[in-house]
C-alpha cells in the first residue's frame, strides 16, 4: 500500500469568495494553515484593506487606552502616540502579521500568566520582543519569543546546545519569561520599570533610578535610560492599542496561522525528523513547526529523554510499528550531523559555557589561546563582527567538558619518568606558566612539548622540566 503524506502546514482553507495563499514575513514556514476570520467572527470583511482611516484624535486615543487599562498603566503621551501611528499607519503589515500569528501562542501566554498571577496584558510583550516568531534572533544573539540572552536563559533554566535551544521552545520560554518578569516586578514594584529592566537589565534601571535622585516611575527616570529602553514601554502600550483597536484602523486580518493537532512522545535516542516524517506519513515542516527548539532537524543521542511533539496522525502510524520506525530514524544522518557538530564554527556540541570578563590588554586571539578555542568561534558565540572588544565586556566561551578533552589535545607526548609536569588550568597561557615555574621560558615549554603555537587546552598535561 502506498503511504500518503499529510502535510497540515500546506493546507489553505477557504469559504465563500475568499480563498488565499499567504506568504508570511520572517515566519517559521513559508506557508501555513490559515483560517478566514469570517468563519469565526461576526463582522463584514473590509472591501479595501489598503484604506487607512483618518488618524484618531489624541483625546480619542487617550479615552480608548483608558478603556483597555487593567493592572498595567497605559500612559498616553506624544511618544506613545508616535508608536501607535507606526503600528496603525506606517507598518500596517507588521500589525497584520502578528494578528495572524497570535492564535499560535496567545493561549500559551494567557495560561502561563494566569498560573503565575501576572497581568494578562504581558502577553503583548512578545510581539515587541520577537514579532511572535519562536526562532527570532537579534543582533545581540537574544533568541526566541521572549528574546532571552544566553546568560539570562541559562539562569532561568533554559538549556541550549548545538542541537536544542530551549529559548525557542514556546512552553519552556514562556514559563521562564513569567518567572523572570515576576522577579523583576518584585525588585521595582512598578510594571513600567520591570518592563524597562526586561529590556536592558535590572542593573541599568537601578543605575537610572540612582542617577535621577531615586525617582520612582519610568517616566521620571526616562532620560537616564538607554535610548532603546526609552522606546520600549511606549511600544508596549502602543501595540496593546493597535491589537485591540485594529478594526477601527481597518487592520482586521482575514487569516490565522494554526498548528496541526498534535500529541507528545518521549524519545531517548537520536531521531532524524526527515526519516521519521517519511515513515509516519507526515512532513518535516510540521515537525519543525511543532518543535521550533530543535535546531538541526534531529534530536541528539545524549542520554536524556526528550519530549517530541508530533501530529496526531503521525503518532497513530507510530503506534503500529514504533520499534522499527524509531530504529530507522535513529540511524540515518547521525554520523554526518555529529561530524558537522564537532567541526563547524561556533559549535557548542559537547561543550560547556563559561563567562569571561575582558581584561585590560586582552585581544580575541589571546582569549582564544587561553581557552583553546578558535577566534572565529569566539566571534560567533558573541555576535562579534569585527575584532573590537572592550574592557569589562562579558564573553561566552564554550569549552569541552572534563573527560572530553583527550581527543582534542595537541599530539600526545610521552612523559619521561621523574619529569616535572603541569596540568593546564582554565585561563592559563604559556607566559603565565613560565612565571609560575622558576628557570623555564615560553620557548622551552614549547620545545619540551613539541608545541607549534601557543594554544593550550584546560586539562592539558605539559612537561616543564
Image (spheres, rainbow, N blue to C red):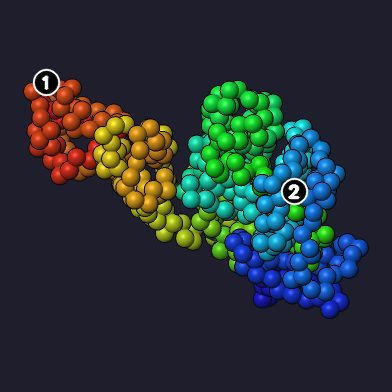
The secondary structure type at the circle numbered 2 is helix
Q: Furthest residue to the bottom? A: 17
* Residue at 50% across, 36% down: 151
Q: Is 118 above or below relative to 44?
A: above
Q: Is residue 299 visible?
A: no
The percent position of residue 243, horizontal first and vertical second, equals: 76, 53
Q: Crowding near pointer 1: few (<14 within 10 Å), some, many (20+)?
A: few
Quarter of the figure with the N terminus: bottom right
Residue 366 appears left or right of 156: left
The percent position of residue 334, horizontal first and vertical second, equals: 46, 56
Comparing labels 1 and 2, the label whose residue is closer to the camera: 2
Residue 438, which numbered label?
Answer: 1
Q: Could you tell me how many numbered marks the image carries?
A: 2
The percent position of residue 298, horizontal first and vertical second, equals: 53, 55
* Of residues 417 and 378, the one drawn nearer to the viewer in this rendering: 378
Q: Is residue 348 visible?
A: yes
Q: Earlier in the sequence, mark 1 or mark 2?
A: 2
Residue 240, which numbered label?
Answer: 2
* Of residues 175 and 352, the one drawn nearer to the viewer in this rendering: 175
* Of residues 236 and 90, the one drawn nearer to the viewer in this rendering: 90
* Residue at 70% across, 56% down: 85
Q: Crowding near pointer 2: few (<14 within 10 Å), some, many (20+)?
A: many
Amino acid at each position: 500500500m502506498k503511504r500518503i503524506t499529510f502535510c497540515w502546514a500546506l493546507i489553505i482553507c477557504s469559504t465563500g469568495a475568499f480563498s488565499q495563499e499567504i506568504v508570511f514575513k520572517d515566519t517559521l514556514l513559508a506557508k501555513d494553515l490559515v483560517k478566514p476570520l469570517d468563519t469565526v467572527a461576526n463582522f463584514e470583511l473590509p472591501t479595501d484593506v489598503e484604506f487607512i482611516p483618518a488618524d484618531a484624535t489624541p483625546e480619542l486615543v487617550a479615552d480608548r487606552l483608558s478603556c483597555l487599562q487593567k493592572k498595567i498603566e497605559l500612559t498616553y503621551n506624544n511618544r506613545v502616540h508616535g508608536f501607535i501611528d507606526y503600528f496603525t499607519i506606517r507598518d500596517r503589515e507588521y500589525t497584520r502579521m502578528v494578528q495572524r500569528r497570535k492564535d499560535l501562542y496567545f493561549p500559551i501566554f494567557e495560561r502561563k500568566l494566569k498560573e503565575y498571577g501576572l497581568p494578562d496584558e504581558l502577553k503583548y510583550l512578545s510581539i515587541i520582543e520577537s514579532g511572535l516568531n519562536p526562532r527570532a534572533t537579534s543582533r545581540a544573539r537574544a533568541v526566541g519569543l521572549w528574546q532571552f540572552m544566553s546568560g539570562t536563559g541559562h539562569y532561568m533554566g533554559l538549556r541550549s546546545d548545538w542541537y536544542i535551544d530551549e529559548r525557542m521552545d514556546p512552553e519552556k520560554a514562556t514559563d521562564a519569561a513569567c518567572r523572570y518578569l515576576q522577579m523583576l516586578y518584585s525588585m521595582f514594584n512598578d510594571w513600567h520599570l520591570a518592563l524597562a529592566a526586561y529590556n536592558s537589565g535590572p542593573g541599568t534601571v537601578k543605575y537610572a533610578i540612582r542617577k535621577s535622585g531615586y525617582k520612582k516611575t519610568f517616566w521620571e527616570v526616562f532620560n537616564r535610560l538607554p535610548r532603546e529602553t526609552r522606546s520600549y514601554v511606549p511600544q508596549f502600550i502602543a501595540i496593546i492599542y493597535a491589537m485591540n483597536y485594529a478594526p477601527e484602523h481597518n487592520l482586521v486580518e482575514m487569516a490565522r496561522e494554526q498548528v496541526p493537532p498534535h500529541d507528545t512522545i518521549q524519545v531517548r535516542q537520536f531521531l532524524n525528523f526527515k526519516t521519521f516524517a517519511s515513515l509516519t506519513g507526515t512532513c518535516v515542516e510540521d515537525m519543525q513547526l511543532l518543535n521550533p527548539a530543535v535546531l538541526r532537524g534531529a534530536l541528539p543521542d545524549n542520554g536524556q529523554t526528550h519530549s517530541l511533539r508530533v501530529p496526531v496522525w503521525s503518532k497513530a502510524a507510530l503506534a503500529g510499528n514504533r520499534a522499527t520506525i524509531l530504529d530507522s530514524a535513529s540511524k540515518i544522518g547521525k554520523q554526518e550531523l555529529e561530524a558537522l557538530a564537532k567541526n563547524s564554527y561556533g559549535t557548542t556540541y559537547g561543550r560547556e559555557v563559561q563567562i569571561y570578563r575582558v581584561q585590560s590588554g586582552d585581544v580575541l586571539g589571546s582569549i582564544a589561546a587561553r581557552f583553546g578555542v578558535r577566534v572565529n568561534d569566539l566571534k560567533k558565540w558573541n555576535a562579534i563582527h569585527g575584532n573590537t572588544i572592550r574592557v569589562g565586556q562579558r564573553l561566552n566561551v564554550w569549552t569541552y567538558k572534563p573527560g572530553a578533552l583527550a581527543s582534542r589535545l595537541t599530539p600526545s607526548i610521552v612523559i619521561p619518568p621523574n619529569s616535572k609536569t603541569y596540568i593546564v588550568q582554565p585561563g592559563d597561557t604559556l607566559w603565565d606558566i613560565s612565571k609560575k615555574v622558576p628557570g623555564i621560558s615560553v620557548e622551552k615549554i614549547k620545545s619540551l612539548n613539541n608545541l607549534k603555537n601557543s594554544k593550550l587546552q584546560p586539562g592539558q598535561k605539559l612537561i616543564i622540566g
